[in-house]
Image: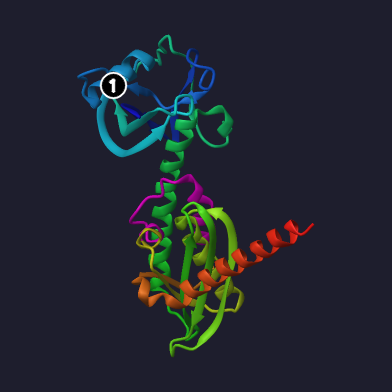
Amino acid sequence: MKQRLSVRAIISEEGETLLLKRSKGRASILGKFELPGGKLSYGEQPEDALRRYLHDDAGIHIQSAKLFDAVTYIDHDDRGIQYGVLVYIVTPSAQRHPMQLGGEYNKYVWYSEAKLQHSELTDLTQLLLGIIQQEEITDKALAQTEENDAKKTTDSQVIIYSDGGSRGNPGPSSAGFVIIDKDGTVLEEGGQYLGITTNNLAEYHGLLLGLEKAHELGYLSVECRIDSMLVVNQMKGIYKIKNRELWPVHERIRMLTGKFEKVSFTHVRRNYNQLADGVVNRILDEHKKLKGQKIDATSML
């Protein structure tokens, strides 16, 4: 697989981000909006490329550029190419001139979700704007968690052990949870077969199922114990979520946490999460057995 490096610029004003509309290019990007930037030339430094693209494509001079993130992206038109994309937050020069678009673009817009549909954006731009939005979401979620921690809680406190597993990653997957009280008594357990998905998505669903049940039962303070360091750190806002498949379930969990007086996330070793792990494997085994019975029944017809 070939690897190439590119740069993209985030230029924001009053909560809106500058996008340029392609007037040239392959069919999958023609007529769509994207963040300014492009591929590095041989021997070119990233910030030099950034300055070149902004000047040539939009007539913008840079006052400062700060590295925001670095992500990888597989080109959908040529899956033999993997791009490393360096994303910069750019402050234009104080001496602003009217926007001057180069030959690759015929329109610009200050983007907000109300102005453009996702279908009007290139795939890469959808990915990058999603990461920017997720950064804002996790910042708000962390602030909300800290605010919840400062609240006075009641004695209605429980511990949720949650887990998820995929046999194949991706493969047949399930999620499970066990809710116990402070004395270690099991109050509730449950889970769900998820179909074909990944370990990380299954881990998230286990957490979601546990929180939904705790809320249904009326508990106000919960400690979530999870053996996935990724999930714990993403829920705390330490790690950003770059996998778009995780965003919807993460957002559902974030909104659900606001219904409790206190929610905390703790990482535990796998051997301390055997109850939830047992639920996950039991569901997978039952599904495998049921699937086998259906195959046997079909073969007898």
> In the rendered view, would you say 223 is above or below 131?
below
Q: Residue at x 38, y 15 (%)?
A: 57
Q: Position of residue 111 (x, y in %)?
A: 49, 31
- Identify the residue shown where x is 41% and y is 53%: 138
| Image x and y of residue 54, in percent | 33, 20
Residue sitting at x 37%, y 57% = 237
Relative to 6, does residue 103 appear above or below in the rendering? above
Q: Is residue 27 left or right of residue 95?
A: right
Q: Secondary structure at mark 1?
A: loop
The single residue placed furthest to the top in the displayed view is 103
Residue 27, above or below 236: above
Quadrant in which the N terminus appears: top left
Q: Quadrant of the C terminus?
A: bottom right
Q: Is residue 21 magenta?
A: no
Picture quarter containing residue 235?
Answer: bottom left
Please give the residue where the numbered disc 1 appears in the rendered image. 40
Q: Is residue 115 visible?
A: no
Task: Name the dominant secondary structure of the magenta segment.
Answer: helix
On the rendered structure, is 164 left or right of 72? Answer: right
Query: How crowded is the residue under tag 1: few (<14 C-alpha within 10 Å), some, or many (20+)?
Result: some
Is 97 or 117 nearer to us in this picture?
A: 117
- The kind of residue on which mark 1 rests is Leu
Residue 123 in sight from this viewpoint: yes
The spot of residue 170 in percent (x, y) is: 49, 51
Nearest the eye: 129 or 207: 207
Q: Residue at x 49, y 56 (%)?
A: 201
The vertical placement of 104 against 112, above or below, is above
Point out residue 125 in the picture as x, y percentages from the top left corner.
45, 31
For the magenta stretch, what is the residue range? 233-257
